[in-house]
Image: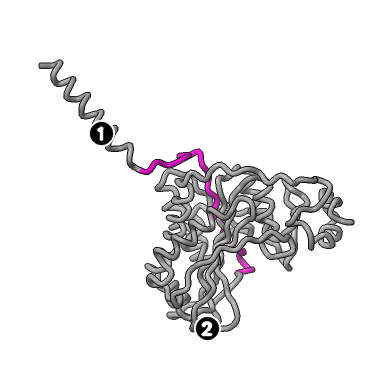
Amino acid sequence: MLKNLQLILLAVLVMVGVGCSSLPVSVGGSKEVVVLDIGHFIGGEGASTPGLVNGKRISECSFWYQYSYYVKKVVESAGYTCVVTNRGNAPTKEPLLSHARRAGVIHLKHPDKNAARYPSKYHPDRVASGMVSADYAIWRKASCIVFLHHNSSGGWTNGASPSMIICNKFNGKPLADTLARTLENEVLNHGMPNGGRGCSTVVRCVDADRAAGWLNACDDSGIPAAVIEAAFLNNRGHAAYLAVDANARKYAESIGHGIVRYMRSGALPQPRHIREDENKPDQGSFGYAAESRRLNVPGAKRLVH
């Protein structure tokens, strides 16, 4: 009888194993690190609504202090390590202080005041504001980094806005596409009005452009990077949607879902961007040689001709 019980138990174990084999499996488990970076910093809030929306004014920095926790929660629930960073100093006042503690924000204490630009520690011919956040992701050997931002364009508008995910040229497109499709399926025109318009993906690689310096530094280290610019704070419909707490959580969680789908897609790992000729600038280098010369960046001397 004992032998029969052992056979039955073995059969059950085999059936369970077969049944579980069809479930999605996390590619890297807790060893895979995802970095979320809160855009801008305390004292340099970035985009904001032109006026009160449902009784409050929303800025991109304060919004993500509050809601980055929900992105992180989704990513960590899938079995990945998730770190939230911000380039500035830690907040000292409520409610941002509590939001920062809840999300476990790591403050890099390097706000780029007066639009100052800095070279990457790892790729010194890459120069940009906000570079310290990309350098942190490179130091952590992150599987990907997602910069949490909002956009604003034109005036205080009623129509559809050009929602987009910006990414690095050599590694970021699969990540950006996955984030864009997830936001379309879960949020854009599914509660957040966008006039039927979807979410595009935009590659930036000329270092003189905003954000391209960080993105290229990530490319040079083989890290997929994406900047979220899918919600416009000067779009009445977007702002009204995000002013409702449940909606803001849904928006943040949707970004988390996109990250998890990318991590499980099999697109990892990504190769480093290797330049064909180390003595010449590549596609992303032209346009900021003067900036590099002004900063006297040692590794950028090859860009000055």
Where does residue 113 sit, x and y in percent of width and height? 71, 65
> Left or right: where does residue 122 sit relative to residue 186?
right
Where does residue 153 sit, x and y in percent of width and height? 59, 77
- Say above or below: 194 vs 248: below
Residue drawn 68% across and 54% down? 216
Q: Quadrant of the C terminus?
A: bottom right
**Quarter location, residue 274:** top right
Classed neighbour count for the residue bearing mark 2: other residues with Cα under 10 Å, few (<14), some (14–19), many (≥20): some
Q: Which residue is mark 2?
A: 157
| Magenta-colored span | 24-45
> Left or right: where does residue 103 sit relative to residue 275?
left
Where does residue 163 sit, x and y in percent of width and height? 52, 70
- Say above or below: 66 vs 53: above
State the residue in front, 240 or 262.
Answer: 262
Q: Residue furthest front?
A: 276
* Residue type at the position of mark 1: Val
The reply to whether the magenta stretch includes residue 49 is no
State the residue in front, 253 or 18.
Answer: 18
Circle number at residue 16: 1
- N-terminal of the pair, mark 2 or mark 1, is 1
**Quarter location, residue 234:** bottom right
Where does residue 301 sit, x and y in percent of width and height? 86, 51
One can see residue 63 in this view: yes
Residue drawn 81% across and 62% down? 291
SS at circle 1? helix
| CB-based contact (under 8 Å), mark 2 and mark 1 | no
SS at circle 2? loop
* Residue type at the position of mark 2: Thr
- Say above or below: 56 vs 229: below
